[in-house]
Image (cartoon, helix red, strand yellow):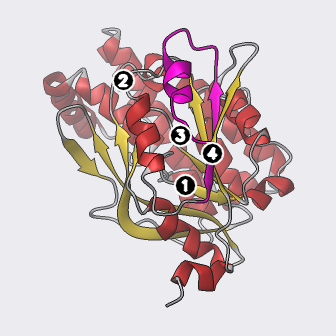
Amino acid sequence: MNDPLDSLLGSKQPLVTVVMNCRNCEKYLAHALDSVVSQTFENWEIVFWDNQSTDKSASIFKSYNDERFRYFRAQHSSPLGQARNLAMEKARGEFIAFLDCDDLWLPKKLEKQISLFSDPVVGIVICDTIFFNDKKDVRQLYRRNKPPEGFVFSQLLGSYFISMETPVIRRSVLDGMDHWFDERFEVIEEYDFFVRLGRHWNLAYVDEVLAKWRIHESSWTWSRPELFPAETRLFLDKLEHNIPNFSSIYSNEIRSVMLKIAVQEALIAWGEGRSRSMREILKPYVCASRIARLLSLLSYFLPFAAFDFLNRFRLGRL
């Protein structure tokens, strides 16, 4: 019996490049690598971009005796967006997937997702994922609300919903972009990248948990929360410049993004003990009673609440 994947994409599996960017990732790296090795879809390569690690990450990666493992070490340390671009330049695959060194894939991830690229207008395929920590699974991302499919630019803009361990993209989508990951961004580079992809390509979804995103507060993303508001404003300015009538066509989505910025700035103010400033920041978006209720809730759950709110912004769940 013919493999259904072969019937969709030909007799030979297409090559998938797995982009892994690393800076001092030794703690969880072997688990991430093992989850790629365990894939039922076998025609893949790993482009491992070592961003000047000083721990054992390189030796862990090189210990795998597999010709599909390709190691590159940066000459100079660079922001994540630039590092992702440098890694993608080395990709030889027809498709590109992303796996950070602290996250995991389930065995059938690539098999299930690659099959959806039989539709030529699909440029991005995502799947469901679970957020977990070292003790337990915390939350399934799409358990209650399934993500939209098809042309989803406005949804990605206003309520970003892609978790970085889930997408696979068609390599050719990069050819039509004037830039890939914006190298000015350190914490919203993936948001900017996939929103722009969503202007020109359809998105498809596999309704199955095929990945896991590790929650840990040592992540670079959470160590610089003040970057979120500034970078998001710069992102909106870029779209305003590049998309005709952007502000009028996408006014609702822009307001949603501005609310997220306000929440981020309010949480920073709260963490610095400036509760009055927090109220002033939220006032244009939230009524007084809701602000009071939010302050009450945060008093019980900080610092986890701040972490969770920032995580929700990353995934468009605010």
Residue farthest to the left?
A: 300
Q: Which residues are magenta?
A: 43-66
Q: Which residue is mark 3?
A: 258
On the image, the x and y values in percent for residue 5 come to: 56, 78
Residue at the image point whose x is 52% and y is 42% from the top: 99
Q: Relative to 177, is 273 above or below? A: above
Q: Which residue is mark 4?
A: 68
Q: Please check the rendered image and state whether residue 127 is part of the magenta-colored stretch, yes or no.
A: no
Q: Mark 1 and 3 residues: CB-CB less than 8 Å, in contact? A: no
- Viewer-nearest of discs 4 and 2: 4
Q: Relative to 156, is 272 above or below? A: above
Quarter of the figure with the C terminus: top left
On the image, the x and y values in percent for residue 17 come to: 65, 50
- How much space separates mark 3 and mark 2, taking CA atoms? 14 Å
Mark 3: give few (<14), some (14-19) or many (20+) Cα within 10 Å. Answer: some
Labelled disc at residue 167: 1
- Viewer-nearest of discs 1 and 3: 1
Badge 4 marks a residue whose secondary structure is: loop
- How much space separates mark 1 and mark 3, taking CA atoms? 26 Å
With 121 as the anchor, is 48 left or right in this view?
Answer: left
- How much space separates mark 4 and mark 3, taking CA atoms? 43 Å
In depth, the one of 56 and 240 nearer the eye is 56
On the image, the x and y values in percent for residue 227 come to: 56, 22
- Viewer-nearest of discs 1 and 2: 1
